[in-house]
Amino acid sequence: MAYGKLFALFLSFLGVAFSVSSSFCAQPSLESILIGYPSPALTELPNYLAIHKGLYAAEGLEVKFVRARSNILVAALVSGNLHYITSITTSIGGIIGGAPAKILAGVIRNNPDFLMAKAEIGSIRELKGRKLAVSGFGGASHQRMLIIIRNAGLDPQKDVNIISVGDAGLRLDQLRLGVIDATVLTAPNCFIAERAGFKSLGSSKDTLPLPAVGLVTLERNIKERPEQIKKVLRVVLKSMKYLRENREEAVRVAMGWLAIDRDLAERSYDVMLPNYSYDGMIPIEGLKASIDLIQSRSAGPPRKTFSPADMTDFSLLEEARRELAR
């Protein structure tokens, strides 16, 4: 994988990619870390909530949440310019491509996405010959699109035209303009699309639990910075517990961060709540399915067959859970 080229893109993207979620004036007593994520959504709310509530600072960490395109995140992690990234799907592709990284925990057990389409389209099979959009090939939205299309009996290679457009906001704009006929969206964008007159044709969540968001770092960090990693994991677990037990506060924070109204925030919170991973674990069958999907799209024969064990290291998560239980 051309990580050098991707990292050059990352450097050129810094001017617009950094989304300040907390003050990043590093204090001598706090350890500074950068966590990369692809786009604001309810799937990322636990991390943002942790920054907002000062949970990282309580663990002695000064954290900045960095927004960057998914194809850049792994390159920035490998180069050492990000300490952690949240995209599990992107990381799976990176690890298959040779990135020395591991998935440490899951934030989402199953991503409740919805295939939103023009109102005149009555079923998934009516998408035959139509133009569909995903964020990027091999990414989370592409995986889910393939599952939905195949389950309806269509061939994604022959029956539909899938194009790469970009993040959820861009895809929603393309849907409104009539450039595309359907796209996969998560909360709150699926509800924004519904308000605009589009409708859901189905969801991959009803077929297979596919993890999308978690915590990923380099293998060397697991050896060299285990205490820092446990701090981050404790914060993530605390934040998800707080989110589950404090609906009003979580809704209010989502409204401010995502610039949405109360109705959208409440509906998004309610659809996401059963899908967060409160113990940090992710469904192994879903992880295996994600690996198989990504490997099946690789050019040429795979250099090896990957399993969930090749992708994960939950040892520090288990330690963090034991420490919180004391």
Image: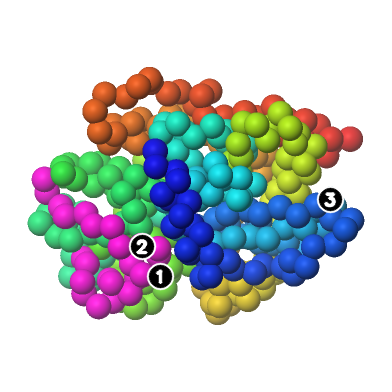
> Are circles 2 and 1 on residues that touch, CB within 8 Å?
yes
Query: Could you say which disc has been placed on residue 59 in the image?
Result: 3
Give the quadrant of the N terminus: top left
- Gap in angstroms between the C-alphas marked 1 and 3: 34 Å
* Residue 70 to residue 250: above or below: above
Query: Could you say which disc has been placed on residue 166 in the image?
Result: 2
Would residue 259 be counted in the magenta stretch? no
Please name the residue shown 42% across and 73% down the image: 192
Residue 277: give x, y in percent of width and height. Answer: 61, 44
Amino acid under disc 1: Gly
Q: Which residues are magenta?
A: 158-181
Query: Could you say which disc has been placed on residue 169 in the image?
Result: 1
Amino acid under disc 2: Gly
> Are circles 2 and 3 on residues that touch, CB within 8 Å?
no
Secondary structure beneath label 2: loop
Give the quadrant of the C terminus: top right
Residue 213: give x, y in percent of width and height. Answer: 54, 48
Residue 71: give x, y in percent of width and height. Answer: 42, 51
245 vs 300, left or right, is right
Residue 98: give x, y in percent of width and height. Answer: 45, 31
Badge 1, how many Cα within 10 Å: few under 14, some, many 20+? some
